[in-house]
Amino acid sequence: MMKIRCCLNPISRFQSTSSAVSRSRLTNDEIRQHRLRIYNNERQTQMERIRRVEKIEIDVEDPIQSTKLLMNKNLSTPYHCAKHLSSVLVDRSCLALIDDEIVWDMNRPLERDCKLKFLHFLEEKCEEQNRAYWRTCSFIIGYILETAFKSNYNVELCSFPPPQFQYGSFAYDAQLNIGDWKPTRDDLRCLSIQAYKLRDNDLRFERLDLTQSVAEEMFKYDRFKLAQIPYMLRLLSPSDNQTRLSVYRMGDYHVDITRGPLISSTKQIGRFEFSAIHNIDVPSYNETMQRIQALSIPNQLHLHYWTFDYLLERAKKKNNASIPTLTKPKTSDNKTDKIE
Amino acid sequence: MNRALQTISTRLFTRPVLPSSLGILPNAGINFIPCAWIRQHKLTDQQMRLRYKKLHWHKFYNDKWVQRRGGGWDEKMTPENQTFMQEVVYETYTNKESPLKDGPWKHGEYTTNPETIRTGVLGLKLGTLPQWDKKGRKFHVTLVQIIDNHVVNYTPPEMINFRTLFTTRPLRRDLHGKVGMLVVGALSSDPRKFTRAYNGLFEQAGIPPKRKLTRFFVTPNSVIKPGTPLYATHFRCGDYVDVQARSIDFGFQGVMRRYGFRGGPSDEYGATKFHRKRGTVGSGRKHKILPGTRMPGLMGNKLVMMKGLKVWRINTKYNVLYLMGPAVPGPNHGYMRIQDSSLYERKQKLTKDNHPPFPTYYPQDGKILDEELFSDDIYHFDQPTLTLDDVQIAPLTTRRTTAKTAQKKK
């Protein structure tokens, strides 16, 4: 089903500075490889900027053991700190807490002297971890949508709403270009199996901050993402003058735009089941897209299949989280955006 | 139970033949036919024990068929969530209608000529009580509760591999290809204690998952639709019943407790090292120990059948049967299979007009049963007391025995 996509939309609202290239002859796989290539190049250039290795002192506070570690600035991650301490911390910790305030990814390099704590799913207050987990799972839905369909179908990813537990599921909004497809229970099961394969591969989530030009080069073929880029740019660190966009890569497989922290690796996924696909009207892009919903629980939590099935029934209902919108760019430095 | 096969040969010689047992043989009317598979002599105890060794270890349900237990790990849920999930479990099974499309199955007809075998029932041994009959004599009675029984599944006779499945009773070759199999379950419980495969067995019938399952082999006319409950009134008061259960597990026991050997004298009589032993083990000039020789070993914990127990009384509110005798196999809170008796004399009395509820007892909307049902012979305490006039007293003077008179003559 080859559709010639004309990305120059008559509505001027989301016409970006560089015009999007038509993707009529490119498959989802090729587009994905292009994004990964640009990610690799950008990462290499950013690594080369580090001329010399500086040391920073990190104070690890853990109920098992608290130590002080000397790590490399802009190179070592909390994951490396955990490796110095114990394998239990490596396996179970999904996020890190810096100075008791800032939530940090496990695979993101540390920049200064700080106090470090490891967060896992079985603590008393685990709202941040749970939200990071569902954010990661939405990210994974995006990957599965791009890879699960046959090469003659073109799937265009749009974005995903921030994780909210009251709606019973997490979702990803995308233009599937399939027409009237009502997925059966077995189809959804096949999609879920893709997620379990990711768990076996143990892929890490790495973060990269891109400037506008690099981001636009990366998402050359994605018209929805291109439109979002101007609204997503923010000043991420005070030392930097340029507004940047945060982008995450899962292992060697997939790149996507998200703001918030993601969990440490795909090994921490427990049960993952796709629940339903609903149609939503998106006035910002003037299209009807599909919202793909799923339900998941981390590996650390054991639930009997009967209770999980009961939660799945709830997840099949339409998720009423926020629909993708393009808010007007504010002149101030802190820009509002709709993706977490 | 061990005498079952023995009685075939004696029956053929002495009593009029029940038509069903000779259905296969060509000359059906004649009593005695010299044929290869009819035994001319009785089997010894030892030989019977060896034959039924496999039958002793029959399990009501084997985990190799479908893995039963699941869950049981510490799900770290908040107490509010736990109570909520409990309520969800109750709600799913209270108002459940049968999901099957078709209506109730047709009830079969009770026939004596081609023999009809009804389902049995899974019960729980509660304990013993004394009861009194109308002559004032006391006897003991075992209470058996028929907890939450439902029929789970039915397989027709064509789909049954008879030799591998029919392991609960001595093999009746004449039933091959003529009996279907009903699966009956007892004690509904939480689906979160079992695996998904085990819970799936009950989904088609629309029942909550059961803790205990057995099979009953049944003639096709006494088929029951999966999902129907079975009550204690499946039997009538005054009916006779066979009970199969696992006997009490005594563990590894010596020969005196296990077989009732007399052992040896105590130390007082100078016995050296022979107090509770077996003694010799050999058998004449044979250079081997005969298979089936009685020695110390595991005692109990094997399937035992008691035949011909009378149902004296039924409690319909709690579904309890009062069965004759205190010696029903198994400890308290042990499960047992209860079926109509297969004894010849008891089966003879069942006719087309006089038979237990067939295929099972279905409660009718208008009719409510009394809470307690009594058989004719039992004395219940609502009745006026028994007086001595009712009871016969033996005369005080007895006739002298011949030995005493002989002495007196001398």
Image: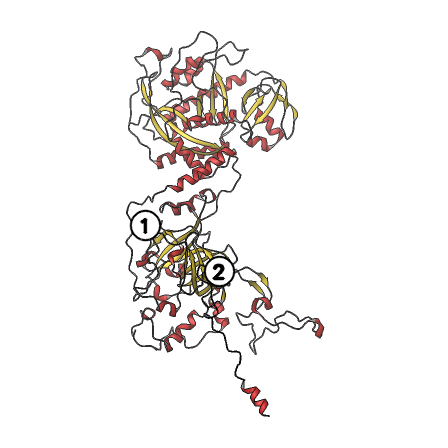
Return the chain for callout 1.
B
Q: Residue furthest top?
A: A331
Q: Quadrant of the N terminus of chain B?
A: bottom left
Numbered disc 2: what chain? B
- The secondary structure type at the circle numbered 2 is strand
Residue A102: x and y in percent read 56, 19
Choose the circle earlier in sequence order: 2 or 1.
Answer: 2
Q: Position of residue A48 (x, y in %)?
A: 54, 17
What separation in Å lies between label 2 and label 1 (alpha carbons)?
A: 31 Å
Mark 1: amino acid = Gly
Q: What residue is pinned by disc 2? A: B142
Which is more foreground, mark 2 or mark 1?
A: 1
Name the residue type under label 2. Thr
Residue B267's place in the image compared with B312, above or below, is: below
Circle 1 residues within 10 Å: few <14, some 14–19, many ≥20: few
Estimate the x, y position of residue B10 in percent, counting from the top left: 40, 76
| Residue B366, numbered label | 1
Quarter of the image with the C terminus of chain B in it: bottom right
